[in-house]
Amino acid sequence: MGKRFEAISEALQEFIAQQKIFFVGTATDTSRVNISPKGMDSLRVLDANRVIWLNVTGSGNETAAHLRTHPRMTIMFAAFEGAPMILRLYGTARAIHNGDAEWAALYAHFPANTGARQIFDMQVELVQTSCGMSIPFFDYVDEREQLNQWAVNKGEQGIRDYWQEKNKLSLDGVPTGIDKVL
C-alpha cells in the first residue's frame, strides 16, 4: 500500500511525465485550503527533489498568495489508466515571476505561452505513494485550448490588465505578489 521516499525515483519521474493532469494544494495558516487542477503539459521534474510548473493566468491566484505566507505545497497525481497509484509530492515552493533572475532559465523548459503568469519552483521533501485502487479509469481525449486562446485574444497588455483586476489578492485578501510585474 502506501510508501514514503525521500526523492522522486526514475520510475516515479516516468509516471509523472505520462500524467495529463495533476492537483496542487496550498493554504496559509488561516486561509481557505486551495486545491487546483493543472494540465497543459505544465510540470517538469528537474531532479529527484525539485519540480517546476508553469502557472498560466486564470480566475484566481491563490497558490501565489499562499506561498508568500506559508511556502508549503502538495502536488498530487492519480493514475486514471494503467496500474492504480496515487503519488503525492510534499515540499516548499516559491513563485518566480517574469523579470526575476531565474525566469528565463526556468521558462525555457516550457513552450511559450501568452498567459504565463508564474513558475512555481518546489523543493520536494517527501514523496508518498498510495494504492489508488478506488480511482476510476478515465480516457484522455485531448487538451482544451480555450484558456490559451483567451490569453492570445487578450494580448500581453490585456493579460496585465486582468492581473491588475483579478489576480492581486486571494479569496481571503492575501496579496499574491503579481504587483511586481505590473
Image: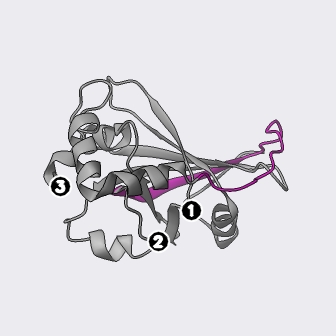
**Which residue is disc 1 drawn over?**
41
**Crowding at label 1, few (<14), some or many (≥20) Cα neighbours within 10 Å?**
some
Q: Nearer the viewer, residue 36 or 125?
A: 36
Disc 2 to disc 1, C-alpha distance: 9 Å
Q: Where is residue 13 in the image (x, y as percent from the top left)?
A: 63, 67
**CA–CA distance in space, label 3 to label 2:** 20 Å
Amino acid carrying mark 2 in the image: Pro
Which element type, helix, strand or loop, lies under badge 3? helix
Residue at 83%, 44% in the rendered image: 137
Is 124 contained in the magenta span?
A: yes
Q: On the image, which quarter does residue 143 sit in? A: bottom right
Residue for badge 2: 111
Judge by depth and name the residue closer to the eye, 44 or 154.
Answer: 154
* Image-based side of 176 in relation to 79, left or right: left
Asked if labels 1 and 2 touch by Cβ distance under 8 angstroms, the answer is yes
Distance from label 1 to label 3 (Cα)? Answer: 24 Å
| Rendering coords of residue 150 (x, y %) | 44, 49
The residue at the point 30 percent across, 31 percent down is 170
Boundaries of the magenta span? 117-144
* Dot label at residue 73: none
Q: Identity of the amino acid at label 1?
A: Asp
In the image, what residue type sits under mark 3? Val
Mark toward the start of the polypeptide (2 vs 1):
1
Element carrying mark 1: loop
Q: Which mark is residue 181?
A: 3
Along the line of sight, which residue is nearer the eye, 13 or 4? 13
Residue 108, above or below 172: below
Going from the N terminus, do you reach mark 3 or mark 2 first? Answer: 2
Q: Residue 120, position in %: x, y?
A: 37, 56
Element type where label 2 sits in the image: loop
Horizontal side of 58 relative to 173 (left or right) equals right
